[in-house]
Image: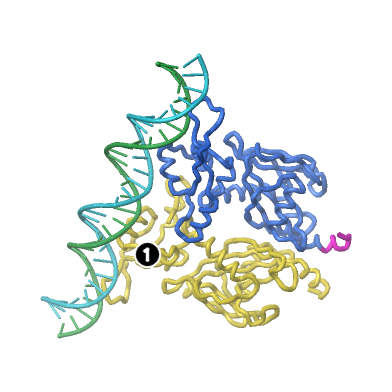
Chain colours: A blue, B yellow, C cyan, D green
Amino acid sequence: MQNSDLKNFFTYSFSLDCVIFGYQNGKIHVLLIKRSIEPFENYWAIPGDLVYPDEDLPVAAERILYDLTRLKNIELHQAQTFGNPNRHPQGRVITNAYFALIRIDEFQAEASSWAEEVLWVPIDEVPNLAFDHNLIVNSTYELLKQKLTFEPICFDLLPVRFTLNEFQQLYEFAFDQEMDKANFRKKIKYIPLIAHDEKQQNVKHRPAKLFSFNEKLYHEQVKKGIYQFRM
Amino acid sequence: MQNSDLKNFFTYSFSLDCVIFGYQNGKIHVLLIKRSIEPFENYWAIPGDLVYPDEDLPVAAERILYDLTRLKNIELHQAQTFGNPNRHPQGRVITNAYFALIRIDEFQAEASSWAEEVLWVPIDEVPNLAFDHNLIVNSTYELLKQKLTFEPICFDLLPVRFTLNEFQQLYEFAFDQEMDKANFRKKIKYIPLIAHDEKQQNVKHRPAKLFSFNEKLYHEQVKKGIYQFRM
DNA sequence: GATAGATATTGTACAAATGACAATATTTAA
DNA sequence: TTAAATATTGTCATTTGTACAATATCTATC
């Protein structure tokens, strides 16, 4: 990109910021990067950058996340758009937040490009961030909590094959609500799960059966209108 | 705006489209305008236009809606952002949808600016629209239905004082589900309503009691955490 | 002012879902 | 073989949901 182009681009441009929520030890974290460039050099921020002129938003989300953190194969979901005219000190930059939920230990984040460091920080210990990124993180966290009720994104936080107890623990954490084991199993009766023959390994007690989310059946049922996910 | 500016602006710009849902005679409608300008001249579309470089999004939403339809004092809510690179034939235009819910008979929509006509069309009879506006309308309608479940925005669609039957009709339409009268009354048992002494007027049968939504009590209960609205 | 017509409002009985608690089953470790 | 640990299933009272019926109250008409 030439300098003159950059100038025009930057008087009115569109960026995309990724709020990556990571689950570990029963806690939700957010992935931050340290900026090595102006503006807000040396500030912590969420990974984000300008969208290319010919790039679709979901593609941009993946590219930007990979460029800055080397994370890939993560399903990103659209969140809110933030367009305050003063949110970026160098010009009008409207930004669209995308978010994802991952298990921290299944991925390896590495600083790349102009990201100097990466850091997982618990959601309730987020420091002062660059731009309006605190607003973006908080708003997106609220949205996440709502979406957990209506969309089966909780499975992003579980291993592909999980025990019903793991599922229940996640539920209890996400909705901050304890639940009886037997009753939890009744509650999820209609969620399309695949029961495998395989069992939990290396536990000092009766191993639990492993399940996985039946994504194909889920989409079929939703399409037919015979099922709507609700936690 | 000068011609050269316009050119740069238009190679990469940001617009805002308003999905205005209107309720009348037990049906949800969408407000359309007929475009008198290219591209998509003479096509029906939802009211939308470019956001000014210094304009915040909520302000732009109000301005654009007023410019094209003369509607004002309507509470607009942000919905999704649509950024497919080919969605606009003349360049890259990313657009952010905003939506609102109103009672059609309480407002007067009038074509203005480059809108040649305005039209309320039932949600299930929306014609082929300009750009990707069918996608925007459908996605936003899904979002609306989700929000109706968790937030008491349905009362925006009812008269301030309404009968339980009116309320039920709205429910049945919004969720596309018929319901027994007696059972509907049980279902809404915990929704904070004020029962007035006043009754329905000018009907040829036993008039129904009038109710209104107890917004004050609702907010108090939500604040205390003793109640969460759910339809 | 009595009665039919229309819709509002309330009641009942059964089915299904929920919640608290208990019982049984399967594995490891000793 | 038995204890320890957790998985899984079962029971029953309570609440909520559903279908249907009964009663109440108003208007219109004679």
Quadrant of residue B130 within the rendered picture: bottom right
Could one spot residue A164 in this view of the protein?
Answer: yes
Relative to B5, is B210 on the left or the right? left
Secondary element at image label 1: loop
Q: What residue does disc 1 label?
A: B178
Above or below, D19 against D14 in this view is below
Task: From the viewer's side, name the closer residue of A196 and A177.
Answer: A196
Residue B36 % position (x, y): 66, 82
Residue A93 % position (x, y): 74, 58
Relative to A1, is B138 on the left or the right? left
The residue drawn where x is 75% and y is 55% is A88
Above or below, A92 against A215 in this view is below
Magenta span has B18? no
Above or below, A171 against A98 in this view is above
Task: From the viewer's side, name the closer residue of B64 and B169.
Answer: B169
Task: From the viewer's side, name the closer residue of A108 and A34.
Answer: A108
User: What kind of secondary structure does the magenta stretch mostly adopt?
Assistant: helix
The residue drawn where x is 44% and y is 57% is B215
Residue C8 % position (x, y): 29, 66
Quadrant for the N terminus of chain A in the image? bottom right
Q: Chain of mark 1?
A: B
The residue drawn where x is 37% and y is 53% is B190
Above or below, B161 against A108 in this view is below
- Name the residue type under label 1: Glu
Task: From the viewer's side, name the closer residue of B140 and A110.
Answer: A110
Region of the chain picked out in magenta, as a range: A1-8
Count of numbered circles in the view: 1
Quadrant of residue B128 within the rendered picture: bottom right
